[in-house]
Image: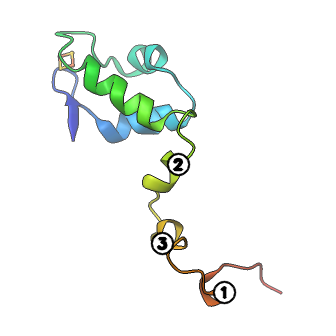
Amino acid sequence: MIVCVCRRISDREIARHARAGLGFDEIQFELGVATQCGQCEGCARDVVAQCSGSCPTAHIKLATHPLEGSTWNHPSPSLQLSPAA
Ligand code: FES
């Protein structure tokens, strides 16, 4: 979803930067989000807050690998990854 229409910046791009440890001000400087009309600032800040280090489960919600998010529902040892012997 596009968060900043003026700069064409998506929530995924903002989230990627937030997960890398950048704060809103750094992301704003890096991407230019909320630097024109400013209408997107609240939404952009919400995305950063949801993905920042203060939310330890953010990586679970945003997991891209199919097994990463589902292992909590499948405690079967057959689904757990183990190093090759
Ligand atoms: S929508 Fe982001 S600065 Fe205008």
Contact between labelled residues 2 and 3, with CB atoms less than 8 Å apart: no
Q: Quadrant of residue 6?
A: top left
- Disc 2 target residue: 57
Q: Residue at x 63, y 90 (%)?
A: 78
Q: Is residue 68 above or below residue 29?
A: below
Q: Residues within 10 Å of mark 1 (few under 14, many from 20)?
A: few
Secondary structure beneath label 3: helix
Split into 4 quadrants, where in the image is the C terminus? bottom right
Q: Residue at x 53, y 67 (%)?
A: 68
- Disc 3 target residue: 70
Give percent across and percent down for residue 21.
57, 30
Task: Give the distance between the C-alpha atoms of the residues marked 1 and 3, in whole angstroms.
Answer: 13 Å
Displayed-image quarter of ligand 1 = top left
Which numbered disc, 1 or 2, marks the residue that appears first in the sequence?
2
Secondary structure beneath label 2: loop
Secondary structure beneath label 1: helix
Q: Amino acid at mark 2?
A: Thr
Q: Residues within 10 Å of mark 3 (few under 14, many from 20)?
A: few
Q: Amino acid at mark 1?
A: Pro
Which numbered disc, 3 or 2, marks the residue that appears first in the sequence?
2
Give percent across and percent down for residue 71.
54, 73
Which numbered disc, 1 or 3, marks the residue that appears first in the sequence?
3
Task: Give the distance between the C-alpha atoms of the residues marked 3 and 2, in whole angstroms.
Answer: 14 Å
Q: Is residue 45 above or below residue 52?
A: above
Task: Give the distance between the C-alpha atoms of the residues marked 1 and 2, in whole angstroms.
Answer: 23 Å
82 vs 40, left or right, is: right
49 vs 11, left or right, is: right
- Disc 1 target residue: 77
